[in-house]
Image: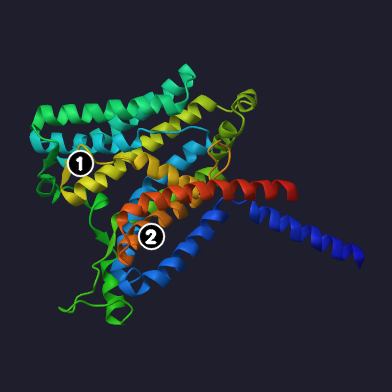
Amino acid sequence: MVSEIRDERVRSVSRLSRLLSRPELGAAAGTVLVFVFFAITAGSSGLFSAKGIINFLEVSAQLGILAAPVALLMIAGEFDLSVGSMIGFAGILIAIPAVFWGWPIWLSLLFTFAVCGGIGALNGLAVVRTGLPSFIVTLGSLFMLRGLTLGLTRGISGRTQVSGVHELALHDPLNSLFSGQVFSGLIAGLADIGLIGKRADGLPSISGIPVSNVWWIVLTLACTWLLTRSRFGNWIFAAGGEANAARNLGVPVARTKITLFVMTALAAALFAAIQVLVTGSADTLRGTQKEFEAIIAVVIGGTLLTGGYGSAIGAMFGALIFGVVQMGIFYTGIDTDWFKLFMGAMMVIAVLFNSYVRNRAMRSR
């Protein structure tokens, strides 16, 4: 009997240890707290109405598209500060060939993804070949890409914005992959049975779910599968945990990191494609500070800045918190100038909490 009790206690401690060691724990708890806070302070203002939910999910989805591959890169012990500038650069690469050179949108998109993927590979190659911190290498890329974007756009169009994409994309075969809405029929059905409100004209208050949300979920699940179910995921954790030991064990650390830089660049191009095709224009300033927002979402999601620990699901929670806070402040009527102060504080608190949880998990083993 005594041995059974002791075994049960050991199993309970083991289960608690596994729970505490999950990087998503802090982000999941933070998500609940944020939802409760805004349910109390902004619930009556429409934040959690169908339209309000779509609003904060769209903000979260666009950031989450960046956060998932950025999480993988940070788990591997590297940073990519060029993703924000890559968004602006990719948007211009889509718009200029289509508007000024007569390219079809599908060709402009393929061209953009190819160029951005190549730049991501160059970033990764520069990091692994020179041994310089990725922070420095990609900080240089940040300024170079922003300058290149501005110079090309002004030189070709004479402006910092390029419009007219929407008309060109209307009948393009790839347009529906990056713009528009999905599940419109389901939304209409939910409105008919009263689960979603209707407008004065009898139509649902929302017409569908933005396609960016589908990309967010697909990318998060794909990155989670890579981390937890593939050999490549083991390489990512090994590269971020102890790169030299990983190399000695035969892990292709350099190739792994270069691949991850390509993934973050392609995510930035995807972000740009969605923005350009939804708004019908490109702007040289698009993506400004998105690199820092992505890092904040990833850190809130439980990924350590030192590498070797984290998850894409946690980054998804971090992006969700970001979207709810950004839109929630607007719905509460609080001055939105306080938003960045709140997010900075959230990041510091998340780092402290994640360090505490990990130390507890290590002690309980």
For disc 2, the marked residue is: 324
Residue nearest the viewer, comparing 201 with 104: 201
Q: Position of residue 36 (x, y in %)?
A: 46, 68
Residue type, numbered disc 2: Val
Please name which of the two marks, 2 or 1, marks the residue nearer to the observer: 2
Is residue 186 visible in the rendered image? The answer is no
359 lies above or below 232: below
206 lies above or below 71: below
Q: Pointer 1: residues within 10 angstroms few (<14), some, or many (20+)? A: some
Q: Which mark is residue 124?
A: none
Q: Residue at x 56, y 33 (%)?
A: 240
181 lies above or below 153: below
Residue nearest the viewer, comparing 351 with 259: 351
Position of the N terminus, as image quadrant, is bottom right
Q: Position of residue 225 (x, y in %)?
A: 51, 47
Q: Give the side of residue 226 with respect to residue 100, left or right.
A: right
For disc 1, the marked residue is: 106
Q: Secondary structure at mark 2?
A: helix
Residue type, numbered disc 1: Trp
Quadrant in the picture for residue 200: bottom left
Q: Which residue is at the far bottom?
A: 193
Q: Which residue is at the far right?
A: 2
Q: Earlier in the sequence, mark 2 or mark 1?
A: 1
Q: Position of residue 127 (x, y in %)?
A: 45, 23
Q: Pointer 2: residues within 10 angstroms few (<14), some, or many (20+)? A: many
Gap between marks 2 and 1 measured at Cα:
33 Å
Report the coloring of the rendering.
Answer: rainbow
Are circles 2 and 1 on residues that touch, CB within 8 Å? no
Q: Secondary structure at mark 1?
A: helix
